[in-house]
Amino acid sequence: MNINFVIPCLLGVESIIANEMKELGAENVTAENGRVLFSGNENILARANICSRYAERIQILVGTFEAHSFEELFQGTKALPWEEWIGVADAFPVKGYSINSDLFSVSDCQAIIKKAIVERMKTVHNISWFEETGPVHQVQFSIMKNQVSLLLDTSGAGLHKRGYRLEANLAPIKETIAAALVNLARVRHYHTLYDPMCGSGTILIEGALLANNIAPGINRHFSAERWLNLPQNIWDEERERAKSLVLTDSQFTAYGGDIDGKTLEIARINAKRAGVDKYINFSRCDIRNFTPRSEKGTVICNPPYGERLLDIEQANELYRIMGKNFRREHGWAYYIITPNDDFEREFGRKADKRRKIYNGMIKCQYYMYFK
Ligand SMILES: C[S@@+](CC[C@H](N)C(=O)[O-])C[C@H]1O[C@@H](n2cnc3c(N)ncnc32)[C@H](O)[C@@H]1O
């Protein structure tokens, strides 16, 4: 079966997700502002959920159409083949948003879409009441400039929830963003990775997962796993496929430091849960005393921004210390994510490359030094 998919994404990571989907075997991959579209079969559905490092969720695109009135919204929704996905007993809650459109009342749109799906299902199944006690098929709508997209979420909990981070420090970076940072730093299985302000260890854990080709979703479940209209074997097949691709001869090593000992305890627990603790060495250390343990290495860090954890002046002082301690030497590359526009000045060097990335709602720059 050929299925159309959508991945909604934060601005800045669309091309990374598009490349990842191509590598996973998806077809017709296109990156747009804030989303990636692709197509594939049921195995691709399971594979994208299990293997994607950067996507937040995988949605099925049930259909798109233009609507300026509630009647058009109703008829457009009713015309779509919902019964292909939603069974008689399944639950199908509806949520979504509307931007720059004639239909702006989200709660009305929600009610109309629900009613239209019910009407469709009534006609197809010839019953008048739906218990909705079965597996959840979350319907998601987006209406942008009167263009309606109707989607079904296959992931359930966001894919950033890998299952390893049960304890959080004050300002952890999202796993999907950490993975994108590691991707942009081109971390490989023969690299040594450092994060001298590692907090709960997310960047290093994602680095270890990527370097060893370990699928981040291998140990969790997805809402579409309970859908009866999907072949049940796809999940086992794709977990087996992912396991078979894990590298067994990797040279990857990582070093994590943080000034806060309690945070490091959490980092150790998280790394163990993720199954990558054997690759990562954590030790309590002030960045003032940062000393590399290898001849070559890649340093990625997400320092305090001067908003939540430290004041601006203290954050700037850390950037100056980093500029001094991150020496410009052959074989070394440094990657720093921060929203601070003065970062390069405080660090003391212009980045070789910069890239805009959203860390949640905070617009950041990813400063890259590799020359
Ligand atoms: C934004 S958090 C990093 C979060 C991390 N990426 C994660 O996912 O959990 C910044 C970290 O820098 C640490 N830190 C602050 N000052 C430091 C210093 N002088 N030396 C080392 N670490 C420091 C804090 O303890 C905090 O854990």
Image: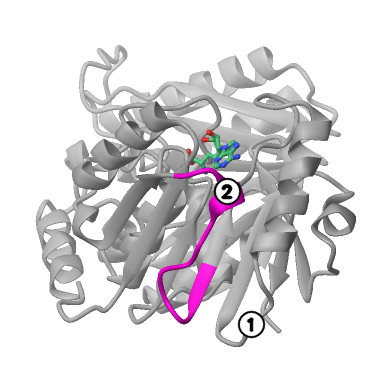
Side (left or right) of 87 relative to 284 = left
Q: Nearer the viewer, residue 344 or 89?
A: 344
Q: Amino acid at mark 1?
A: Glu
Q: Nearer the viewer, residue 362 or 84?
A: 362
Across and down, in percent, residue 92 comes to: 38, 25
Across and down, in percent, residue 326 comes to: 65, 65
Location of ligand 1 given as a quarter of the image: top right
Find out whether residue 188 is within the magenta segment: no
Report which residue position mark 2 lands on: 287
Find out whether residue 292 is within the magenta segment: yes
Q: Which mark is residue 329?
A: 1
- Quote the CA–CA distance across marks 1 and 2: 18 Å
Across and down, in percent, residue 279 comes to: 25, 62
Q: Which mark is residue 7?
A: none
Q: Nearer the viewer, residue 64 or 28?
A: 28
Q: Amino acid at mark 2?
A: Ile
Residue at 53% from the left image edge and 45% from the top image edge:
197
Across and down, in percent, residue 246 comes to: 20, 72
Residue 229, visible in the rendered structure = no
Residue at 83% from the left image edge and 33% from the top image edge:
313
| Label 2 residue SS | helix
Residue at 54% from the left image edge and 43% from the top image edge:
286
Write down the quadrant of residue 226 in the picture. Answer: top left
Position above or below: 238 against 311 = below
Span colored in magenta: 285-298
